[in-house]
Structure formats: structure tokens, C-alpha cells
Amino acid sequence: MRAFAISKEYDERFPEAQALSKEAMRVAKTRGFVRTVMGRRRRYPTGERLHSALNAIIQGTAAETLKVKLLETHNNRKTLAIDLRATVHDELDGDQDPDPKYKQMFKDLLEEPDARIPCKVPLLWDVERGANWRETTA
């Protein structure tokens, strides 16, 4: 019962979210699919699971954005003095020269607007460093 109260309060405080979700559901039902910012489609051929339409747009766009930035990082790895090791969900992991200038260069590259990712607000990235992964999450 408490979950319904929390959901109701959220909808009252942020009605735009509910309206956006309903619009994504309407589009998914009408067209049979929704698109990410870069144009990938999530299909709803049977009209089921429409509640996931907004999440498909948001998460799909986030995945595309990370892939674009991963490619840019790879293409600039020598300039950034970075060796990429892995991607984990929404993060890039690797080894980088400890000189602070490289950290700033990396942050600048990530936050540089990209024409493939049309956004009205800037995308901001946290760049953390440490001797190991645990030190970066402290």
C-alpha cells in the first residue's frame, strides 16, 4: 500500500513524468514502436508491455551515447594516455597516465557535444581515478 502512496506523491510533484510516459505509450501503441534519439527502434507488435516505452527511449539513448563516447575515447586513446580495459553498464574502465591534465582532457572529450546525439541540455560525466576500481567509488 505504501508503494501506491509514494507513486501518487511522485505523480503529484512531477506530473510531467507521467505525461511523458503516457505519450511514449501512445506512440508505441499507435506506431507499434518508439525510437531512441539516434533512431533505433523498440518494437511493440502485439501492443503489450507498452509501460516500458519511455524506458526504452531513455535507456536506449543512454546506451547509444555511451557507445559514441567509447568510440571517441578509443580513437583518442593515445592523446588521452589511456588504455581501455572494459565497459561496465554506463562506465568506461581503463588505465590512464596519472598526470591531472589527462583526466581533464578526458572529461572535456566526454562532455564535448556530438551532432549524432542531439540534446537540448549538456551531457555531464564524472571522471574518477584511483589506483584501483574501489578507490574510484569511495
Image (tube, rainbow, N blue to C red):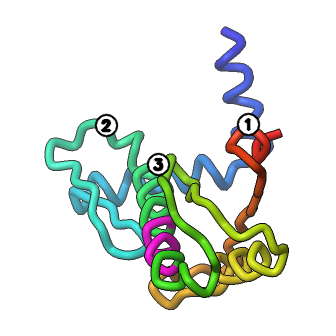
Front residue of this view, candidates 26 and 6: 6
Mark 1 near mark 3, Cβ–Cβ under 8 Å? no
Predominant secondary structure in magenta? helix
Give coordinates of residue 28: x percent, y percent: 31, 55
Give coordinates of residue 119: x percent, y percent: 59, 79
Indicate the secondary structure of the residue bearing disc 1. Answer: helix
Label 3 neighbour load within 10 Å: few <14, some 14-19, many 20+: few
Give coordinates of residue 131: x percent, y percent: 75, 49
Instruction: Write down the residue under mark 1.
Output: 10
Indicate the secondary structure of the residue bearing disc 3. Answer: helix
Instruction: Write down the residue under mark 3.
Output: 55
Q: How many numbered badges does the structure rendering display?
A: 3
Query: Is residue 94 a member of the stretch shown in magenta?
Result: no
Q: Is residue 104 left or right of residue 72?
A: right
Front residue of this view, candidates 73 and 7: 73
Q: Quadrant of the N terminus?
A: top right
Give the residue furthest to the bottom: 115
Q: How far separated are the C-alphas under marks 2 and 3?
A: 11 Å
The residue shown at (72%, 75%) is 107
Mark 2 near mark 3, Cβ–Cβ under 8 Å? no
Q: Earlier in the sequence, mark 2 or mark 3?
A: 2
Give the residue furthest to the top: 1
Label 1 neighbour load within 10 Å: few <14, some 14-19, many 20+: few
Q: Is residue 43 left or right of residue 87?
A: left
Q: Amino acid at mark 1?
A: Tyr
The residue shown at (56%, 58%) is 92
Q: Amino acid at mark 2?
A: Arg
Front residue of this view, candidates 28 and 43: 43
Range of magenta residues: 66-72
Q: Amino acid at mark 3?
A: Asn
Q: Is residue 124 left or right of residue 69?
A: right
Instruction: Write down the residue under mark 2.
Output: 49
